Image (cartoon, grey):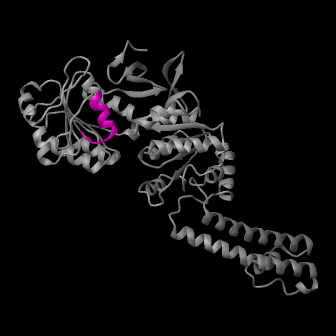
Amino acid sequence: MISTPLDHRVISTPRDHRGDLTPLDHADLDAERPDMTDHSFLIIGDSNLARRVRDALTARGRRIVHLVAPDDAELRAALHRSLAGIAILTHDDLVALRYALSCAHLLPEVPMVVTVFDRTVGDQLEVLLPQCLVTSPADLAAPALAGPCIAEGLLAAGRAGDAMERIEVLGGLPVRRRDKPLRKSLWRTATAHVAGLLRTPDQGTRMLSIGLFGMLAILILDWLWLVFGEHQAPHDALLHAVRVVTTVGPAADAHDHPRYAVAASAAMLATVVFAAMFTAGLVDRLLGPRLIGLIGPRVLPRSGHVIVVGLGQVGLRLCRELMLLGVRVVGVERDPEAENLRLARLLNIPVVTGHGGDRGLLERLAVHRARAVAAVGSDDLDNIAVAIAVHAVSPRTRLILRAGEHETIVDTRSLLRLGAVVRDVSLLTAVYVVESLLGSPPHGVVSRDSEVFVETGPGRFFRYDLNRGPIGGPL
């Protein structure tokens, strides 16, 4: 494909059925306007998704006007023509909202497909603009990524009501089935909370836990010594044990029991250290972001969990999807000031800040006991680095990689023998957008290796090629 930018504009027209193109200048654009009435589309955005949608529609004989970052004048000029559809495919929700409102004001009758990550903004946009179909790459990708995180061989998984819907391969073909959500045992949940509290990778939480449990241990041991060793009444023993823990001093008659006096003195000295650690950890939690809980749902899981590296929109939706299906998750985010960390706290997702490729961090997160590791950052090369690190630490752990933002992953996939499941999020979204622009929004889109399947209705799958459309009949 040959494309020529003209003032942030790429105009593509088909020459023959093979999709060969010729560049046009401004004069050509004016001359072509009367002919571009039935199959022309406007695409706005500088993302890899926008380029894939442009190339796919061009290969299928449609005429495309691609505006990378148009100003008001350029957008108004492009909207003078009769358009079959508009696709606004940007990474910025506010930019997408602005372009959608402008296009709807100038051409209210033309259907639009807009990618918006924020679900609240997307819902309101669909209410305000009935001709607008709002989708999100994160929403499309979450089920496709959750499936292989739960079990090997699943193409997708999601919650429908009180049941889990999964798409798996039977006889080489995708099949949709309904199951009950995965249930968590109370015993495993309790043990996971205790283990997560004792072995948290967060330094402040670890200090708080050590200090708290240390003081409790001294209190209990001192009480047991006095009750069973010195035969004191339980209430008197409790009072004397509290005096030791608060470093006020042992019982008044401690000099009559030399061994207890020595033990109480050592206990008070240890309590000073434990109290200092508890105070430091408590201050750190009060002033810090508190991404890991001491008790409750944000306690760090230690086994059977999924480690999600990268808490962007895709990572956040994946964590939420897995939690709805009853799978314990822990998120890893490199940036301690990331915007989505606040949302992760509200959703009760335990999060550790650090680099997902750090061997020490992976070991502290018990990667060898994890159900899977999903590297879903926005940079494909970072995801590959995480996959290599995980494979080095725990070769048997299942790997799921997000791809699609760079073409590098296509070449690297054949070189890395990691056994990773790769989900091209950009490709899945491009298929959905192209079919929606052509008038038939799919029920779902899933992939397996290099194959893509479009679900036109519940259980009706077609093999799909982005540049040619459905291949053959329903599977």
Farthest top residue in view = 473
Viewed as shown, does residue 469 lie left or right of 100?
right
Asked whether, in this view, residue 30 is left or right of residue 188, the answer is left
Give residue 292's quadrant in the image: bottom right
Name the magenta segment's main secondary structure. helix
355 over 405 or under it: above or below: below
Horizontal and vertical percent position of residue 47? 32, 41
The reply, left or right, for residue 83 in relation to residue 430 is left
In this view, 13 is above or below 323: above
**Extent of the magenta region:** 44-55
Would residue 411 be counted in the magenta stretch? no
Q: Residue at x 43, y 54 (%)?
A: 340
Q: What residue appears at the point 74 percent right and 69 percent down from the top-left corner?
A: 214
Image-quadrant location for residue 119: top left
Specify whether 379 is left or right of 224: left
Q: Residue at x 38, y 31 (%)?
A: 427
Q: Position of residue 320 (x, y in %)?
A: 48, 44
Residue at the (69%, 46%) spot, across then down:
187
The answer to whether 255 is drawn above or below residue 69 in the figure is below
Kindly tell me whether residue 438 is visible in this rendering.
no
Rendered-image quadrant of the N terminus? top left
Decide which of 192, 83 is in the foreground and name it. 83
Whether residue 23 is visible: yes
Give residue 267's quadrant in the image: bottom right
The C terminus - image quarter:
top left
